[in-house]
Image: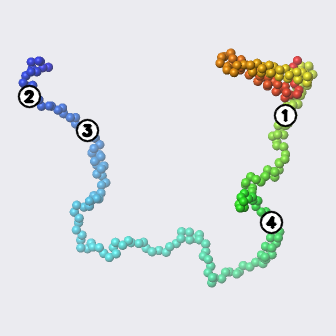
Amino acid sequence: MYTQAEEGTIYNLIPVEEVKPPKDPRHASKFKSSVRDEFKHNKADHKTMGQAKVPVPTTDNFLKKREKEPKLPTKQEYKYPDEDRRKPPVPKKDDKPLMGLKTTKNFLTINAVENITSVPKKPEKKFADTRIGDTHALEPSGLEPHFIHKKEYGEVPTYLQRRKVEMDRAQEEYDRYVAEHFRRGAMRSLTAEERDAIIDGLKANWEDIHDQYQGLSVVTDTAPKKNRKERMEAQMKQLERDIEMFEKHRVIYIAD
């Protein structure tokens, strides 16, 4: 540390040489030698630039006639790969066929009999869908009613027959149940007058609630108004279900 007196000396005016710190040694990979050897391995000599010194040709090593022409393989007779499976050639016009085999079959008579006794072929069903007569097959088009040709056509399906039997059995069990309760006096049926009176009473209640519903305020801005409107709507829906049930069933049983 310099003092105030030392800072004012003339020695401080002499430039001081800057001392640079030494650099760290450069990194050397331990694979350097192996990479160099692999790079030089299997390199062909004189591959691009040629030999450094071209050898002088000798007097007996000169270019001869037809020496650079391509050498073709020896000419051989061509054979097809499937020659053993090929059909025999067509006979020539001078060849005479063998006439050793003869037959007494009268082909004219046989063909005539077959054509007379054969069933005529039915024409294919077609339909035209354009004004110029373009035709198409009728069967795959869906216009041909195939279902009417089924064996079970017109018969009641099996699942409907089974369902009818189950419904009849359930109705018989219900009738026995009702008859047993009638016998014990635990159940009775409503008369037509009682049924009509109940329906009229339900409709009158619905009309009363409906009149009150029509008198409600259109704007339901408070909770009591909203609750009252919802309660009236629920009551009218319940009355509608009850009226529908009574009108749907002619016979109604009640327990005493």
Question: Label 3: which residue?
Answer: 27
User: Mark 3 against mark 2, which lies toward the viewer?
Assistant: 2
- Which comes sooner in the sequence, label 2 or label 1? 2
Report the amino acid beneath label 1: Met
- The quadrant in which residue 251 appears is top right
Task: Between label 2 and label 4, give the one nearer the viewer.
Answer: 2
Whichever of labels 3 and 4 marks the residue nearer the N terminus, that label is 3
Residue 131 x %, y %: 72, 60
Residue at the spot 88% in from the left edge and 28% down from the top edge: 250
Q: Tell me if 69 is positioned left or right of 189 in this view.
A: left
> Going by the picture, which residue comes out furthest to the right?
183
Side (left or right) of 228 relative to 54: right
Mark nearer the viewer, 2 or 1: 2
Tally of marks: 4
Say whether disc 2 or disc 4 marks the residue closer to the N-terminus.
2
CA gap, disc 2 and disc 4: 134 Å
Marks 3 and 4, how far apart at CA: 102 Å
* Discs 3/1, front: 1
Q: Which mark is residue 91?
A: none
Are there few (<14), some (14-19), or many (20+) residues within 10 Å of tag 4?
few
Question: What amino acid does circle 2 point to?
Answer: Ile
Q: Which of 225/79 is in front?
A: 225
Q: Is residue 181 visible?
A: no
Residue drawn where x is 67% and y is 81% of the image: 97
The x and y percentages for residue 14 are 8, 28
Q: Secondary structure at mark 2?
A: loop
Kind of residue at disc 3: His
> Dot 3: what SS?
loop
Compared to residue 34, the image places residue 111 above or below, namely: below
The picture places residue 48, in percent across and down from the top left corner, at 28, 59
- What is the crowding at mark 2: few (fewer than 14 residues within 10 Å), some, or many (at least 20)? few
